[in-house]
Image: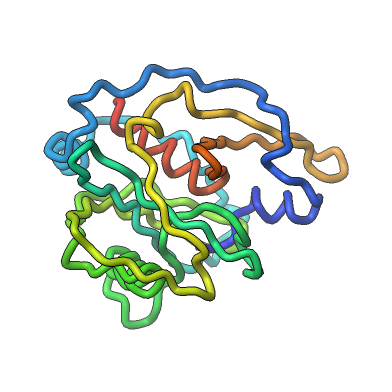
Amino acid sequence: MPFSFLESVLVKLHLDPQRLPVDAIAGEAALPPERLQAAWLRRRLAHPPAWEPELPQDLRERLPKLRRAAVLVPIVQRPEGLTILLTQRTAHLNNHAGQVSFPGGSAEELDSSAIETALRETEEEIGLNRRHVEIVGVLPDHITASSYLVTPVVGLVTPPFDLVAESNEVAEIFEVPLAFLMNGLHHQRMSFDLPEGTGRRSFYAMPYERFFIWGATAGMLRNLFHLLRA
């Protein structure tokens, strides 16, 4: 996934987001169980109500020439409940090294849509065959300071399926219960000072076990939370 403004600034400042103090907990109530069912998600994504995305900040005026990219937000239908499938990037990558992200990447000329980009990139990165994925909708575009317009494509994933990580990009593939991520008590707000006294930047983090979900990925999950709770 393309490098975001937040991540690029932290790299330049040599700051580890996991070591920053927690400013606040978002604290909204967890989604009720009926909203964590595949049938309900299908209906909500097909006919979304009026709602206000919290992220991303709109950088269109500063970044007029945007390149297209897309990620898949894979919601796996497990017997014990829905989960979100995520990847941890390898440590040697130039962008997103060691970070948690959705599978996805830049659009190619032959891609017919953001959905095609997300499905193709997911197949390439983690080997998830598209026949297991039911596309149910999209989230608001996420604009990065590296001049990418990233479309999060939401898909319900039906097991069983085989995964093969692209070893150069993906160190690990894991799942997080959707119920955990759709609970404002697990959404931490953190911040840091921008260079040269130009202000302060805040972001969300959603630590889960040994994984630190933050930045663009946490922002997209935060928007999914707002959409499902609206």
Q: Is residue 64 above or below residue 24?
A: below
Horizontal relation, residue 113 to residue 169: left or right: left
Q: From where the camera sits, is residue 52 visible?
A: no
Front residue of 48 and 126: 126
Residue in front for this viewpoint, 201 or 59:
201
| Image coordinates for residue 85, horizontal then vertical, percent | 36, 51
Is the C terminus in the top left, top right, bottom left or bottom right quadrant?
top left
Q: Which one is in front, 132 or 203?
A: 132
Q: Nearer the viewer, residue 195 or 60?
A: 195
Residue that extends furthest to the bottom in the rendered view of this protein: 110
Q: Which residue is found at the position 28% from the left and 69% from the top? A: 116
Q: How is the rendered protein coloured?
A: rainbow
Query: What residue is drawn where x is 45% and y is 74%?
Result: 166
**Residue 186 drawn at (x, y percent):** 48, 27
Image location of residue 52, percent across then percent down? 39, 31
Q: Is residue 203 visible?
A: yes
Residue 153 in the image: above or below residue 90:
above
Q: Residue furthest right?
A: 196
Q: Write down the quadrant of residue 135 in the picture.
A: bottom left
- Total labels drawn: 0
Q: Is residue 198 left or right of residue 123?
A: right
Looking at the image, which residue is at 57% across and 28% down? Answer: 188
Name the quadrant containing residue 161.
bottom left
**Left or right, 136 with reference to 217:** left
Going 65% across and 31% down the picture, which residue do you hit?
A: 190
Tell me where residue 101 appears, x and y as whole percent. 48, 54
